[in-house]
Image: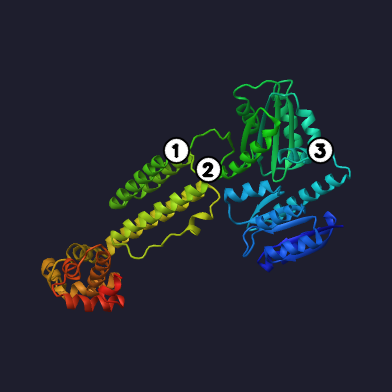
Amino acid sequence: MLSVLIVDDEAYVCDGIESNIPWDEFGIGNIHQAHTGREGLAIAEHLKPDIIISDVRMPHMDGLDMASALQEMGIQPQIIFMSAYSELSYYKKALKLHAVSFVEKPIILEELYAEIRHAVERIRAARGPRLSEEELRAYGLGSLLRGGNAPAADAFRKRLVGFNCYTLCVVRCATATLEQCGKLTRDVQPLLPSGVQTVIALDSPNILALVAWPKARSGQLQRLGKVLLDQCHTPGTFITGGACTSLEVLPQVFQQAMERQVYAFFHSVPAFDDGTRTPSSDATVSALFQHALAELQRSADGLHMQSVCGTLERYFTDLSQSGVSPDRARSEALALLSQLRAYMCGKGLVDPHAYCWNDVACFSLLDELQAFCCRQAEKMVTDLSDLLEKGRSAYLIMQEIQAGYCQPGFSIATLSEKLHFSESYLSSVFKRQYDMTIGTYINKLRMEKAKALLLLPGARISQVAAQVGFDDTDYFTKRFRQYTGQTPTEYRR
């Protein structure tokens, strides 16, 4: 019987996996758990499990370091990593550790089931039981591309020696099964020139397609990618590929193609990425951002709802073509929403949602991220429109305060005189809209401005007091201490 070790710092994750996988189907009878990387290392060193299913991020020792330590000990189980963090560095290190796969959290049991089956197939192939031709081909090609030395990988090398060019494609496809591989082989082979060697095999959850060409010519990778794309019509299909002239370089080509799979984020329809696009400069990406922000601000000023989504659609199209990474696209979207929020606050919008990384990190497609940004921007414009319709007087009062609060002698009385309304009316309108008194708002503006000025080199307290509307330094000091709990001198230390 085979054995498995499940390592995750959340006990319920270990329990859920242990309870919901039909281990008997795989011939697995010994199941163990560990809840830290160090505990997992100790158990694996003692029991030498056949398969390890491990979280990546754990306290004290993460899953990657645990696997690396086992490798140094000469213990090399089949490893399935789990992680909610889609960062290229994790994929890259996992590939170097010969991990079977990288399963994203939250775990989908069907996906984990497929990866465990794949790991068991590798173990059985290494131990010599008979496999079907399709399974042997999948194992041999996967081992070859990961730099392995299994007999099946050596057999593949012998078949491919003598060719002058190798093109490799990784196909992420919802129907990645042995049956799909067989159908793809039958459909693709007639579309390629005679004399080439074609191998299409399952490397769950992906399909690998390797073509060896007698002569190296330009466009061979693009030709293979187009043929595969024409045959794979399932939504979510994404193909990455690379080419080389040496078998020794194939593992590197495979690793780079796997890393680029994260760029499926930019494609809601089947697409092929040959890795040749040059990313735009930071200056270009910044210019796209500033242009989009300026257009959104103009739309907000004019309360033009329709132009908001048009601006965002153009921006995200340009961003996807700029070659930025998915996480950079998410960061740019977060910054755009945050900048627009700050602008709307300046227009009088009260406490709109403050955006954070979790708001944008959850989207697996750019279209989903774009739709979210449209909804948020439209809501801010709608809320501003409502504010101006229902609380225009309060907003005008706020504008007058912001324009004059630093002037000596500025008060509710001078505001009343300028706007030709009684002090009680102004106070009532402002309090109803912003849930604070005019005096409180004036004091807040003055104190926040004073805090910034006090941190400037050489700023004198008397000068700061005058700059925020106080002609009495002692009175300014008293109000500043009431607001911050510190004197101006204490604050600047």
Q: Which residue lies under the disc numbered 2?
A: 266
Q: Amino acid at mark 1?
A: Ser
Please report the residue visible at 32 percent of the width from the left and 56 percent of the height from the top: 343
Q: Looking at the rendered structure, which numbered label has been put on residue 118?
A: none
Position of the N terminus, as image quadrant, is: bottom right
* x and y percentages locating residue 323 in the rendered image: 49, 39
Q: Which residue lies under the disc numbered 1?
A: 280
Q: Earlier in the sequence, mark 2 or mark 3?
A: 3
Q: Amino acid at mark 3?
A: Ala
Q: Looking at the rendered structure, which numbered label has been put on residue 152?
A: 3
* x and y percentages locating residue 477 in the rendered image: 22, 76
How far is mark 2 from mark 3, CA to CA? 36 Å
Question: Which SS class for mark 1?
Answer: loop
Q: Is residue 170 above or below residue 485?
A: above
Q: Is residue 155 left or right of residue 104?
A: right
Q: Quadrant of residue 272?
A: top right
